């Protein structure tokens, strides 16, 4: 049964994981201008879209609910889900300078060396922000659509195909990396 599950639900093997990390680095090292966003937003909600004016919640170490009010958010739900599901998810865009004040190293941030933090370079709408993929917040699709239609929020940008692939690479590196060997050993015990 374990062999069947490994076959059906493979994690990315370590070699592929490291190659994906290398590709993320190549996106940044090339230093040629890559258009990560489209000149105009897509006419529908699409994975990777950035919207304005969302609040994000999390719980601190004492179990107290905390909120980041009114910041940009990136749609994490798949495009098909964003069009059809009742609930869709977003991650916040945090100001780059605020992250630097939290003792993050600038080079590590802008070179995407943190698994859960995503930086998109050379994009005026995004280059001063870090997308925090560890802090997901859910909204109803109906509420988001109402806000967009009534001017309560705006869709600020949609990812180009290269931007979308870069986004998928970062998601892959973040969520599909193999677990530590100790965790795998304990799971199979």
Image (tube, helix red, strand yellow):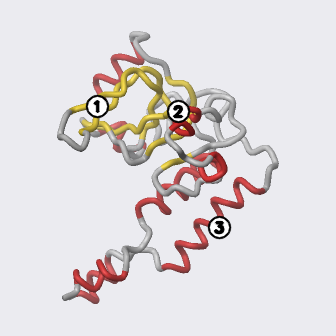
Q: In the rendered view, would you say 113 is above or below 32?
A: below
Which numbered disc flags the more N-terminal residue, 1 or 3? 3
Q: Which residue is mark 2?
A: 98
Q: Which residue is mark 3?
A: 22
Of circles 2 and 3, the one toward us is: 2
**Quarter occupied by residue 91:** top left
Q: Position of residue 169 (x, y in %)?
A: 55, 58
Which one is in front, 42 or 90? 90
Q: Secondary structure at mark 3?
A: helix
Q: Which residue is mark 1?
A: 139
Q: Position of residue 84 (x, y in %)?
A: 31, 38
Q: In the rendered view, would you say 164 is above or below 37?
A: below
- Quarter of the image with the C terminus is bottom left
How far apart marks 2 and 3 lie (CA) works out to 27 Å
Which numbered disc flags the more N-terminal residue, 2 or 3? 3
Of circles 2 and 1, the one toward us is: 2
How far apart marks 1 and 3 lie (CA) works out to 34 Å
Q: Secondary structure at mark 1?
A: strand
Q: Is residue 186 left or right of residue 33?
A: left
């Amino acid at each position: 049964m374990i062999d069947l599950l490994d076959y059906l639900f493979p994690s990315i093997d370590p070699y592929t994981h490291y190659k994906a990390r290398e590709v993320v680095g190549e996106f940044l090292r090339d230093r040629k201008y890559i258009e990560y966003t489209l000149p105009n937003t897509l006419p529908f909600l699409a994975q990777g879209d950035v919207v304005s004016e969302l609040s994000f919640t999390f719980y601190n170490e004492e179990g107290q609910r905390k909120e980041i009010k009114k910041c940009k958010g990136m749609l994490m739900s798949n495009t098909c889900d964003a069009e059809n599901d009742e609930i869709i998810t977003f991650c916040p865009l945090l100001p780059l300078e605020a992250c630097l004040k939290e003792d993050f190293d600038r080079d590590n941030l802008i070179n995407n060396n943190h698994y859960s933090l995503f930086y998109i370079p050379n994009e005026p709408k995004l280059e001063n922000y870090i997308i925090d993929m560890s802090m997901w917040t859910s909204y109803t699709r109906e509420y988001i659509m109402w806000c967009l239609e009534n001017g309560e929020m705006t869709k600020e940008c949609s990812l180009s195909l290269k931007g979308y692939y870069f986004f998928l690479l970062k998601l892959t590196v973040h969520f599909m990396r193999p677990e530590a060997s100790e965790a795998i050993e304990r799971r199979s015990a």
